[in-house]
Amino acid sequence: MVSQQAAIGVLDSGVGGISTLRTLTRMLPNENFIFYGDSANAPYGEKDAATVQHLTSAVIEQLRQRDVKAIVIACNTATSAAKSQMMTQYPEMPILGIEPALKMAVDAGKHNILVMGTPLTISLPKYRAQVDRFEDQTMIHSLPCAGLADLVEQGHDGLDQINARLDELLAPYRDQPIDAVVLGCTHYPFIGQLVAQRFAQPVTLFTGYEGLGHNLIKQLDERQLLRQDHNLQQIEFMSSRQTKDELALYQQLFQNGIGI
């Protein structure tokens, strides 16, 4: 019997999912969370789908050993490549995933949308189906951002390289009337301000975190797993690179962001 008091597990290929975790802890203030970052294998976005499925399953096993009551895949790539398989593999466990917020940008009436994602996320049929669904309503630009998540893994120390990579990636879009940017990797919201600065006109950034949070609340409520007591929230960080410096980086990113 799963306990209401059990924590919610949140996983990512590295530090990126901490951006999702920050929203979830705000939306569910009575819930405890365990975050697992697979930083030793980051990033997932430049691996093949079978490898991502294997790595995601291994992390879920780590979280199941902690008796979590639900799992959030806070990684766009792992959601696209592995979520369906994980739901079949663990049918007793509520498993949710984060996906590029393209529909949210379209529903907001945006007309020229840039979607930034990892190469694997952008190439998978799940994302391509979203583009096919909405491309008659708006202009959609899909931008695979090889190497960018890996630079965000360095935290503040990678800022110079992050800026150089963003200059390279976004240069072709500076003269286009982009009005929305979908940050289709959970690493990217940490550098959302830097992304927005590359455009002469204001752009709206979309992450999809609030929708994920509402879905998590709904699924826990349906299973009567929402905590009813007012709890002093506890957040635990775990990593496949279980070093003091890595865990300190997780704490710093959760509390302060990347420091830009």
Image (cartoon, helix red, strand yellow):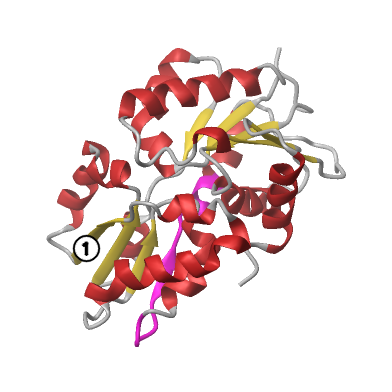
Q: Measured along the vertical axis of the image, is residue 28 above or below residue 258?
A: above
Residue drawn at x 49%, y 15% as measured from the top left:
91
Residue 248 counted in the magenta span: no
Q: Residue furthest bottom?
A: 200
Determine the secondary structure under disc 1: strand
Residue drawn at x 38%, y 55% as measured from the top left:
101
| Quadrant occupied by the C terminus | bottom right
Residue 218, given in percent of the width and then of the height, sits at: 56, 38
Q: Measured along the vertical axis of the image, is residue 91 above or below residue 94?
A: above
Q: Amino acid at mark 1?
A: His
Disc 1 packing (10 Å; few <14; some 14–19; many ≥20): some
Residue 105, given in percent of the width and then of the height, sits at: 34, 63
Q: Is residue 208 left or right of residue 118?
A: right
Magenta-colored span: 199-214
Residue drawn at x 41%, y 36% as measured from the top left:
79
Q: Measured along the vertical axis of the image, is residue 151 above or below residue 88?
A: below
Residue 106, given in percent of the width and then of the height, sits at: 29, 63
Instruction: Name the image quarter holding residue 242.
Output: top right
Residue 202 counted in the magenta span: yes
Q: Residue furthest left?
A: 136
Residue drawn at x 74%, y 58% as measured from the top left:
255
Q: Is residue 71 visible?
A: yes
Judging by the rendered image, the residue that carries numbered circle 1 is 141
